[in-house]
Amino acid sequence: MAQTYHNFVAGKWVPARSGKTFESINPARKKEVLGIFPCSEAADVAQAVQAARREFRRWRLTPAPRRAEIMFRAAEIMVSRKEELAQIMTREMGKVLKESRGDVQEGIDMTYFIAGEGRRLYGETTPSELPDKFAMSIRVPVGVVAAITPWNFPLAIPTWKIVPALVSGNTVVFKPAEDTPLVATMLVQIFEEAGLPGGVLNLVHGFGEEAGAALVAHPGVDLVSFTGSCEVGQQVAVRCAQDFRRVSLEMGGKNAILIMEDADLDLAVEGAVWGACGTTGQRCTAASRLIVHKQVAREFTERFVSAVSRLRLGDGMKAETDVGPVINEAQLKRVDSYTQIARQEGASILCGGEVAVEGECAEGFFYKPTVFAQVTPLMRIAREEIFGPCPALLPVGSFEEALEVANSTSYGLSSAIYTRDVNRAFVAIQELAAGITYVNASTIGAEVHLPFGGICHTGNGHREGGKTVLDIFTEWKAVYVDYSGKLQKAQIDR
C-alpha cells in the first residue's frame, strides 16, 4: 500500500479539506504507485496563502544572514541525502539516475550560492546632488510569492525560486507539478528539518486547473513565479495583470544548434545527441533544431542518426539506460502526434518515430528517439515545442542563413554553435536571438551563478539564476537622509 502524504501549511502537515487525493506513479513502470497526495482546491490554497501572509512580517524582519543560515543548513541536508533524492526522482520523473543526481546537485549548488547572498543583497550608495544629504538604494521583499514549478527538474527549479525568495525575506506558497509531488514533499521536509519557521514555506499539492489557478488568482499573492508552458504562462500573466501583481515567467524553447562546415564533427554529434535526447528531450533548453551546413550535412547526419539509434531505452534506475520514459501518457501521445504531423508536412523519419512497446518498455511511457530530416523552417516540427527526443535537421548553405533560420522561431531561450572560427563564434554570440548561447557545447548545461531565461515567447524578461534572480524577488527602495537641518528642494535649489 502506497504511503499517503499531505500539504504543508503553517508548519503542519494537513490533508486537503475535500479529502480528495491523486496518485504519483513511476512513468517507467506505470503500475507502481509512489504515493498518494492531496488534491487541493481553492480553500486549501487560501489557507496556505493566509499562513504565508501572517508570517511575512516576522520573516522579513529576520536579519538576512539569519535567513541565509537556514538555507545553508538545507543545502547540507541535501548533500547528505543526495542519492536518496536522486533515486526517488528517477522513479517519479523517469530521467536516468545520473541526470537525477545532476538535478539534485544543481539544487544544492543554487541553495549554497543564494545562501551567500544573505550577507550581500547589495544596494547602492551614491553622492547626492545637494550638500549634507545622503542617498542610497536598498532591496526590500515583495511579500507572498507563489512558486509554481514543472516536473522535468523537480528539485532544481523549485530551489531556483524558493531559496532566493526566502533569502530576500518573502514567504512562499509552493505548488509543484502533479507529476512529481514526492520530490517536492522531500524538499519541503528538508527546509523544515533545517529550521525554517512554520508558515514561511507552505506546500499545496494538486492540479493546475484547481490549485494552480486558485493560487494565481488569490489577492493575497504578491508575485507569481511560474515555469511551464507558454499557453499556461500567458493565462498567468493576464490574470496577474488584472490586479497589477508581479509575475515572472519561464516558459518554452525551440533551441537550435548550428553545426558549421568547420565544426569538430565528433564533438558536434556528441553535443547534439546530449542536447536532443538528454532528459528524453524534456528540457526547455533541449536541442530540438539542428541547423547543419550543407558541406557537412551528409556526414553529420549519418553519424548523428547512428548515435541516436544506439541509445538504449529503459528504466532510468538501470545503469545501462541512456534514455528514460516521457512523463505520462498524455505527453506520450503528444510526442507521437508530432511524428504524424512531420509525415503530413513532408519530412522524413530517419530513425524512431513510434511508441516503444518492446520488453520492459511496454510497462511505461517510452518513445523511441526520433530524427526528422528534410525539414524546412516553416514546418510545425521546426516551430513548435515537442518536448520529446525528436530533433529536426535543417540544412543551410551559409553561416548567415544558419543565423536567419535559428532566429526564425517565436522562442528565444538557448542556442549553440559548433565552429573553429573564433570570429564567427563571436558574431553568433552577438546575433543569435536567445538568452543563452554556447560555443562548441550543447544547448543544455546552465550554471547557477549565471542568469537563466530567454526572450520572446520564452519569458517576460526576468532571469532566474545568478544574482539577477534577486531582481524578481525584491523591490528597490530609494532612501534619502538629509542632515542639513533645513528644507532642500532638490533640483529647484540648484
Image (cartoon, grey):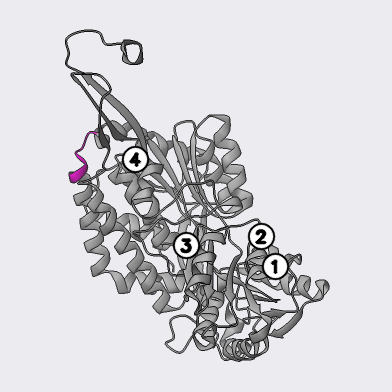
The magenta stretch spans which residues?
61-65
Q: Amino acid at mark 2?
A: Thr
* Residue 423 badge: none
> In the rendered image, which residue does mark 4 sit on?
171
Element type where label 3 sits in the image: loop
Q: Residues within 10 Å of mark 4 (few under 14, many from 20)?
A: many
Element type where label 2 sits in the image: loop
Callout 1 touching callout 4 (CB < 8 Å): no
Element type where label 1 sits in the image: helix
Return the disc, 2 or 3, that comes first in the chain's sequence.
Answer: 3
Return the disc, 1 or 4, that comes first in the chain's sequence.
Answer: 4
Residue that extends furthest to the top in the rendered view of this protein = 486
Return the disc, 2 or 1, that comes first in the chain's sequence.
Answer: 1
Q: Residue at x 81, y 71 (%)?
A: 345
Return the disc, 3 or 1, that comes first in the chain's sequence.
Answer: 3
> In the rendered image, which residue does mark 1 sit on?
382
Element type where label 4 sits in the image: strand
Callout 3 touching callout 1 (CB < 8 Å): no
**Is 264 situated above or below 1?**
below
Q: Amino acid at mark 3?
A: Thr
Nearer the observer, 431 or 352: 431
> In the rendered image, which residue does mark 2 sit on?
409
Q: Residue at x 69, y 63 (%)?
A: 383
Callout 2 touching callout 3 (CB < 8 Å): no
Residue 486 position within the rendered picture, expressed as x and y whole percent measured from the top left: 20, 8
On whether residue 9 falls in the magenta region, the answer is no
Callout 2 touching callout 1 (CB < 8 Å): yes
> In the rendered image, which residue does mark 3 sit on?
180
**Is 251 situated above or below 328?**
above
Residue 432 position within the rendered picture, expressed as x and y whole percent measured from the top left: 56, 62
